[in-house]
Amino acid sequence: MKFQKSLIGATLALLALQANASAPTFSSVAAFAGNYMAPTFTVNSQTAYVANDSVPFTRLRPLFDTNDYLVVQPGGSATINLNGAKSFSFLWGSPDPLNQINIDGFTFTGGGLLGALANTSNANTQWATFTSDVGMNSLTLETGTIAFEVAVPVPEPETYALMLGGLGALAFVVRRRKV
């Protein structure tokens, strides 16, 4: 009986947390030059793929992107695993008013997020950022009418160097504790 009460209490607490969960916030600015690539994604249909200059129908490459990028064709979807990240940014090429973004059950449309800037023009490529205080698990890109193109920044070499330095320091500490 005691176990059942604690289980019911835990369930009610979880439901209260979910009810208080707030939608991720969105911001955007005009696109800027940088080094971009296609994000790692799970294909939810046969109409999502990584495009580059050798793939046909890549006319709507996000502005400033010179590498590969993700294309979700009409009727398709692709999911990006965010692993609890509190912020996620991407280059949104030729945003369409009907492009949909679903983050952990919250659905946004291109028109709702970008207003008049969401008009399928590559010249309106936007640097888009979603943030959440509680973290985000996944972001699903969907479109019904016009393709959805996305690219993410390529980590700078300094980022890799810093990560390798941290792993080296961690290995040193672990090895030293064993001695």
Image (cartoon, rainbow, N blue to C red):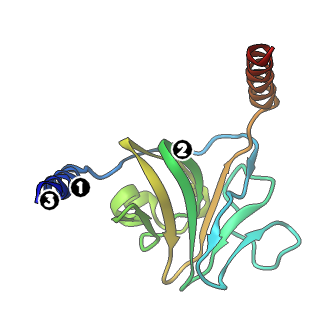
Give the label on residue 133, or none.
none
Q: CA distance from mark 2 to mark 1?
A: 33 Å
Count the labels in the image: 3
Please name whichever residue, 107 or 120, is drawn nearer the observer in this view of the structure.
107
Q: CA distance from mark 1 to mark 3?
A: 15 Å
Which quadrant holds the C terminus? top right
Give the label on residue 8, or none.
3
Query: Where 169 falls versus 78 (above or below)?
Result: above
Can you identify the residue that label 2 sits on? 30
- What kind of element bears circle 2? strand
Residue 25, given in percent of the width and then of the height, sits at 35, 46
Residue 158, given in percent of the width and then of the height, sits at 78, 25
At label 1, the amino acid type is Gln
Which quadrant holds the N terminus? bottom left
At label 3, the amino acid type is Ile
Dot 2 or dot 1: first in sequence order is: 1
Which residue lies at the image location 76% right of the left edge and 43% below the top edge?
35
Please name whichever residue, 71 or 1, is drawn nearer the observer in this view of the structure.
1
- Which quarter of the picture shows residue 4? bottom left
Which residue lies at the image location 81% right of the left edge and 22% below the top edge?
168
Query: Where 120 falls versus 160 (above or below)?
Result: below
- What kind of element bears circle 1? helix
Please name whichever residue, 44 or 33, is drawn nearer the observer in this view of the structure.
44
Give the label on residue 18, or none.
1
Residue 111, given in percent of the width and then of the height, sits at 37, 65
Q: Is residue 40 left or right of residue 20?
A: right
- Which quarter of the picture shows residue 46? bottom right
